Image (tube, rainbow, N blue to C red):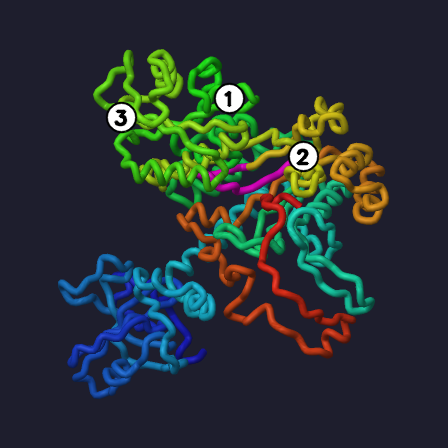
Amino acid sequence: MQDWQRTHTCGALRAEHIGNDVVVNGWVRSVRDHGDLVFVDLRDRTGMVQICADASSASGLHDTLAGVKPESVLSIRGIVRRRRPGMENPRLETGSVEIAVTRVDTLNQCRQPLPFQLNDEAQMSLVNEELRLRYRYLDLRRPRLYEMLKLRHEVITSIRSFLNREGFLEIETPLFTRSTPEGARDYLVPYRLEPGLFYALPQSPQQYKQLLMVGGVERYYQIARCFRDEAQRADRQPEFTQLDLEMSFVTQDDILNLTEALTIELITTHSTKTLGSRPFTRLTYDEAIARYGTDKPDLRYGLELRDLNHLFQDTGFSVFRDTIESGGFVRGLIYPGGAGLSRKNLDDLTRFARQIGAKGLVHLAWATDSDSEAPVLQGPAARHLTADEARSLVRAMGAKPGDLILAVADSFRVASAVLGRLRCEIARHLSLAPRDVLHFCWVTDFPLVEWSEDEQRWDASHHPFTMPHLEDLEYLESDPGRVRAQCYDIVCNGIEWGSGSIRIARADIQSRVFALLGISQEIQQERFGHMLEAFAYGAPPHGGIAPGIDRLIMLLTDNDNIREVMAFPKIGGGGDPLMGAPAPVDASQLAELGLQIVPRARDSVHGGDPGSNDRA
């Protein structure tokens, strides 16, 4: 045994260890030289303990410790003793004891000036993120980040335990696969043996997990690494981790119920947060849009949108009347207590609404000194409303004196989307969403396809392997926008956590959906012939879901940035400051792969399909 091998970890020492001869290893967090005494805080993955050396000792250990630089790696031998009265630190679990050092081994000296200080969390928020990621190995020494990685490990362990109990097999699927350019861009890998051919890194294991169901596995899961070449945002990375699972002989309710049980077990085991509802709220896509203006609603607060067409069919207010007569909608939202907003605040709201697609924003403030029988509304549009219309409006909106009524007159889609965004802004401004609540909900019955004005074709709302509702199949060719998909998203606090669907298991239906998406029979056979052929051999009804591991850790730790919960994330644009990737390669490597770099104007980085983890 080496002299420096630890007997205890730094965070393990307590009063019951007083008098023990121990060896601890770790990094120097700080050195405090008081002349006759020197104190060192030594940190490892389990916590921190105080080391003490007395100048009166003839051993020279006092001078050795006093000269140590922060973040050097030490092995300390000594006797555990109680701290002097009044010197305890109740903020540390080891705060009642210290180690009187008898031996110091410097295992590695920190020889470089630190690019940033690690022992001040408040200051760390001011450090440039790219600098932190350039020195990520130092950043990871912070206890907060270590605890994040530990939580991630524990959550994944619990996921495996739960699914193993439920009869699932953990199976790895290939990382080198075929490019099927649907949705986000693929990352391509050149095939050395035949230049001009390429593998693609998987955006999800979608096709493989369906083929496992055809193969009779019935219950599969994987902690899957996935890759998407798309625009970087706070909740996205080019490579990410998802829980990927698939089940045979199941209905949508079977998958929702299992996922819900898993989620509840994870939250109650690994978080002190409160669940907003048990069982989880369930909304159809149409309900979510109508009530909240988004398919990712935050249900920690109310502020529901209202339809107002029935109030203004014959109004003298031309903005409302003309919109309704042209087939549009007037929709409203309450800003609680917003009647007192300043002119600047109201102008800011209107500007925000215009920026996100509205032609304008009507605001009507209900004066606090008026009653419900004769509400006095204030605002540029108020003079166009009759007393009966004002009274009906406040009743329909559920408004109270002092509230501000916001209304948008436009298409249903635009009015809903704009008010949905305003709803979130109001909640943020009024701090309506409790941070200690996780309100999960299911959103189901999405449209199977959406019309792309840019491409002038139908696109899959989720992915092309999603099963339509059987009763809607008759409209697949004649009225595609009417067809609902057997798909579902699980949403928490306005963030999509995972997405899934019942899959198409019949070759004839799959071919019809491909055709609707503009994929010719020839391309179907070239890109998806293996799937169509597999279905012809007898595929069971099956479905699955793919919740994001990274996003779950974000929710559990109140992080708004996905990079904070990953060990080695990329920055915007997909760059890795630590490794300096992406980077040029040798000309000989390019020649071996049959590749040549063709200079071109540098494109801005932009993404493809804004789909969820389960969307291909």
Q: Please tell me how crowded label 2 is: few (under 14), some (14-19), or many (20+) other residues with Cα within 10 Å.
A: many
Q: At 62% across and 49% down in the image, what residue appears? A: 608
Q: Mainly helix, strand or loop, the magenta region?
A: strand
Return the disc, 2 or 3, that comes first in the chain's sequence.
3
- Name the amino acid, label 1: Asp
Is residue 495 part of the magenta span, yes or no? yes
Q: At 23% across and 82% down in the image, what residue appears? A: 62
Q: At 73% across and 44% down in the image, what residue appears? A: 212
> How far is mark 3 from mark 1, CA to CA?
29 Å
Q: Please tell me how crowded label 3 is: few (under 14), some (14-19), or many (20+) other residues with Cα within 10 Å.
A: some
Q: Which mark is residue 405?
A: none
Give the secondary structure at mark 2: strand
Q: Residue 22, relative to residue 216: is it above or below?
A: below
Q: What stretch of residues is rendered in magenta?
A: 490-501
Residue 177 sits in which quadrant?
bottom right
Q: Is 118 or 198 nearer to us in this picture?
A: 198
**Is residue 359 left or right of 428 when viewed as pictured?**
right
Q: Is 477 or 405 nearer to us in this picture?
A: 405
Residue 463 sits in which quadrant?
top right
State the residue position of label 3. 402
Is residue 365 part of the magenta span, yes or no? no
Give the secondary structure at mark 3: loop
Return the disc, 1 or 2, that comes first in the chain's sequence.
1
Q: Which mark is residue 322?
A: 1
State the residue position of label 2. 449
- Name the amino acid, label 3: Gly
Q: Are marks 2 and 3 in contact (CB under 8 Å)?
A: no
Q: Is 433 or 160 nearer to us in this picture?
A: 433
- Name the amino acid, label 2: Val
> How far is mark 2 from mark 3, CA to CA?
43 Å
Give the secondary structure at mark 1: helix
